[in-house]
Amino acid sequence: MKQISSSEGALVLAATPIGDPADAAPRLAQELTDAPVVLAEDTRRTKRLCDALGVTPRGTMLSYHEHNEARRTPEIVERVAAGERVLLVTDAGMPSVSDPGYRLVAACVERDLAVTCVPGPSAVLMALAVSGLPVDRFCFEGFPPRKAGERSRMLAGLADEQRTMVFFEAPHRLAATLEAMAEAFGGERRAAVCRELTKTYEEVRRGGLAELAEWAVEGARGEITVVVEGGAAKEVSLEDGVATVLDLASGGVRLKDACAQVAETTGLSKKALYDASIAAR
């Protein structure tokens, strides 16, 4: 893939600081200065960031948020197609990740237009790093549903997830969400509540979900990321593993590939699965 020149039309997603402006990538200041078009989730906050970075945008700054992205996306795509370099920033973190941007990226990709990004601060990765929980495998689940019933159903679907899970949550819903997590995953499941990361009152509270839910009742402020330990792998018998292998094989999966898949998810020996599956055929 060829490098995208600053003189070519492109959509540039730029990560902004999640708290401390000093964390901004040097390229962010350059892009904010030079981009012909800057799309901002909140133009006032972006202007404050520009002031903190000591830059003055030369291009046009337009609002781009959840209430106008459907209407504004076609216009922006045409500007990129016409050769303009459009910079998209949100209030904090990477655009399109639980923030406006996905619709625009998808539209540009559909037109085979250039899309790139300026990497930078990430609340997800920082929370993972400081949580003290396993980080070798993880999944990001975004904001849980606001309605209690929908939230409970979502969390119940994650009860067997073995990877460390990362969520965003609003302060006024934190206690209810932690209570729902304790019910779905068990009150002793380890977790970490990370708030105001990189800011003056940064805090990381670690403990079991039930304990954290009780703590959160008092109220927590600021931007919040919740990291939850994955569930323990369930013990699966060789007989059940073979049944799954044969089911996959009957669907067209090569026997060796089916054994590898089941071994990966169950911890059973791939050779034992293969030998037993051959014998069972």
Image: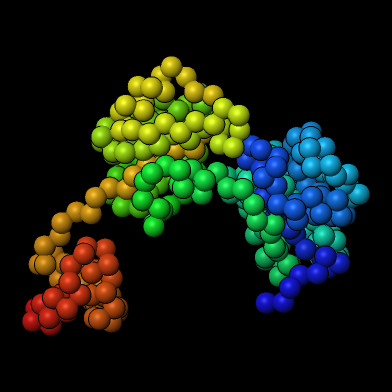
**Quadrant, the N terminus:** bottom right
Q: Position of residue 274 (x, y in %)?
A: 17, 79
Q: Position of residue 93 (x, y in %)?
A: 63, 45
Q: Which quadrant of the figure has residue 48?
A: top right
At horizontal 24% and vertical 81% (from top left) the residue drawn is 255
**Quadrant, the C terminus:** bottom left
Instruction: Give the farthest residue toward the right.
Output: 58
Q: Number of marks in the image?
A: 0
Q: Position of residue 38 (x, y in %)?
A: 81, 49
At horizontal 24% and vertical 50% (from top left) the residue drawn is 232
Q: Is residue 206 left or right of residue 9?
A: left
At horizontal 36% and vertical 51% (from top left) the residue drawn is 134
Q: Position of residue 272 (x, y in %)?
A: 13, 76
At horizontal 65% and vertical 59% (from top left) the residue drawn is 106
Q: Is residue 33 left or right of residue 118?
A: right
Q: Is residue 23 left or right of residue 246?
A: right
Q: Which quadrant of the figure has residue 215?
A: top left
Looking at the image, residue 31 lies above or below residue 207 = below
Instruction: Give the farthest residue toward the top.
Output: 218
Say whether residue 264 is visible: yes
